[in-house]
Amino acid sequence: MADTAPEPAPVILGDEPGSFPHGVLADRHPAVVRQVRDTFPFGPERLRALDALLASCADGVVEPLPAEADARDRERWARWGLDAYAGRSWYEVPWLWAESHFYRRLLDAVGYFAPGTWQGVDPFRPAKLAELDDPATDEELAALDGLAGLTADERGRALLHGSLWGNRADLGFRLSEGGTGQQVDALVCDDGDALWSLLDTPGPRTLCLVADNAGRELVPDLLLLSHLLAEGRVDRAVLHLKPHPYYVSDATPADLLDALRRLTAAGGTAGTYGRLLWTALREGRVTVRAHPFSCAPLPYADMPGDLRAEFAAATVTVLKGDLNYRRLVGDRWWDPTTPFADVTAYFPGPVAALRTLKSDVITGLTGTTVAALEKGGDERWRTGGTHALIQVRT
Ligand SMILES: O=P(O)(O)OC[C@@]1(O)O[C@H](CO)[C@@H](O)[C@@H]1O
């Protein structure tokens, strides 16, 4: 690890037409608004608000929070930069900030925070439930029974890869089982052994698992967690979820309950893992957090003291997914060979990232890997979700 933090690279903005970030602001956000508009029979007031947000996505500016916003929320957003960015184009402020704030505005538009019919109604819940109900989920859960013949270590590795590739909403058990599948080749960095070593240190061991998506990502996350508890690799776990709907499919406490019920109702190994986790929650060995900072438009380097203390107390904090990775290393145009240990040196304890690559940010690669990826013919290796990484700073 370098003695000093690396010189920060430029922050990613969404202002360049044709770039991935620009496409998210200009195309994906309007598509999300249209999808939400069709999800429920919103009345004229909500439809007007959704249409205003749709128009704003094209050429609008960041606006102050509405007058009826809760005072604590208002104070938080002021601290998170809203006063500085109000009046500026979505395309000129940091991309991470713009995306995160877009979801806050979407919840305003559907009346999520306001007293009334739509208060607390997750506009993404039907899509999340459909994923859990998909027959493919049954197949993937049934495939777990095939892991019975493996040693506990092999099973642990298969479940780790299931959780990793679940970030592409694609459980990876069957391929990981063989150990040399295409998905293993698609790992641009694999510090898996370092993660297992951390879970071998003298106990008691606490895992902080910062989850990402609900549905078919959260399910394998829970299976991994349950396995680690069952095998005594961790004694306690803190599961960090989002306090409210975010980035379409991010997991909230309500999504955790849906996933848990899905697991406990399943037969075989999946059901056993589900019941184990249910008991661990009842006994307080697993606790759930939905910290406001989990939906903040800022990197983890800016985390508040209470969250910092929680991560500091963990044996290891595992962050799932692309957005958490962006927040962990900073949403910047890093040189891909910038050491992961350097950009995460500020983190208050050992930290691991499990991520499929779905945005431009990348650190911790070797020069050889970067050259192979650039030459490999897959121009979208940074953003297409075809590659993944396990990176650990001990
Ligand atoms: O965190 P996840 O679920 O792995 O990925 C979320 C994500 O792909 O969605 C964004 C586009 O809205 C990307 O920029 C972003 O990082």
Image: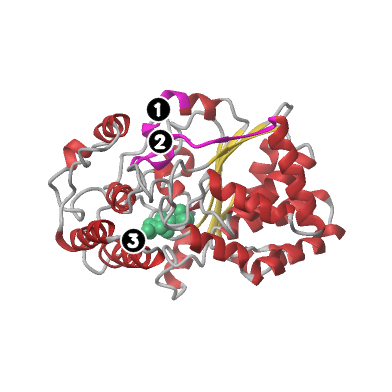
Residue 315, horizontal then vertical, whole percent: 63, 31
Q: Earlier in the sequence, mark 3 or mark 2?
A: 3
Considering only order in the chain, which callout, 1 or 2, is on the residue closer to the N terminus?
2
Circle 1 sits on which residue?
Answer: 304
Q: Which residues are magenta?
A: 284-306
Q: How is the image coloured?
A: secondary structure
Q: Are marks 1 and 3 in contact (CB under 8 Å)?
A: no
Residue ID at (49%, 28%)? 348
Residue 352, x across and y down, in percent: 56, 42
In-image side of 114 versus 391 (left or right): left
How far from the left and from the top, in percent, is residue 332?
A: 32, 48
Q: Which residue is mark 3?
A: 42
Q: Residue at x 42, y 62 (%)?
A: 382
Q: Which residue is mark 2?
A: 293
Q: Nearer the viewer, mark 3 or mark 2?
A: 3
Give the residue type at disc 2: Phe
Other-residue count near label 3 (Cα within 10 Å), few / some / many at <14 / 14–19 / ≥20: some
